[in-house]
Image (tube, rainbow, N blue to C red):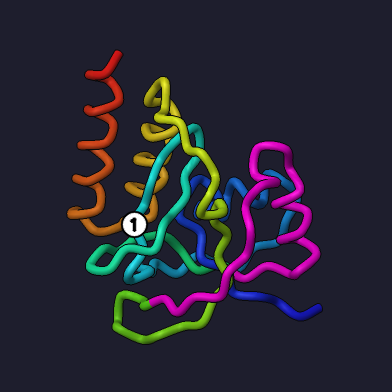
Amino acid sequence: MNKITAFFYGWFMDPALLKDKGLSPSDAIVAKLPSYKFILGQRASMIACSGEETWGTLIELSQQELDQLYSEPSVKDYAPIDVICEDTKGQQIRAKTYILPDDYKIDPPKNSNYARTLYDICRKLELPKKYMTTLTSLINQIDSSK
């Protein structure tokens, strides 16, 4: 079965979570997606934005597994796009990622639970400290808006 390289930037960047869903992910490769800004509502997404970057992981799954993953109610509105990521050694890698449509209304998160779990995943996967600081700021913004 052919595997597809996918760039994940939310909870799905954790291979253990994917395995818990019955999928067979490859090992995760830490990578960034240049010119995309991470945004957070009730779930994570990205928007094209020059000068920004979003960190996550590259993981191989079959098309059937990706279809199964993105058929879940909480992520069914995400659409695939083709992107070029960069691993920590500077190598460019073609991948598929899933984002919400440009016209999708993203409401601000009501609590920081998603962001806190995402932070823990990023720490476990050893994403760059600069990115972790960005997530910490986001958590603090959410908590202070209550």
Q: Residue placed farthest to the top in the image? A: 146
On the rendered structure, is 14 left or right of 68?
left
Region of the chain picked out in magenta, as a range? 60-85
Any magenta on residue 76? Answer: yes
The residue at 54%/45% (across/down) is 104
* Depth check, front residue: 68 or 34: 34
The residue at 26%/18% (across/down) is 145
The residue at 31%/57% (across/down) is 127
- Residue 143 at x, y percent in the picture: 27, 20
- Which image quarter holds the C terminus? top left
Above or below 9: residue 21 = above
The residue at 27%/68% (across/down) is 50
- Please, what secondary structure does the residue beneath circle 1 have? strand
- Residue 17 at x, y percent in the picture: 59, 46
Q: Local crowd at mark 1 within 10 Å, few (<14), some, or many (≥20)?
A: some
Any magenta on residue 57? Answer: no
On the rendered structure, is 1 left or right of 77?
right
Q: Residue placed farthest to the front in the image? A: 103
- Residue 5 at x, y percent in the picture: 59, 74
- Residue 15 at x, y percent in the picture: 56, 55
Name the residue beneath numbered marker 1.
Answer: 37
Above or below 112: residue 91 = below
Q: Amino acid at mark 1?
A: Lys
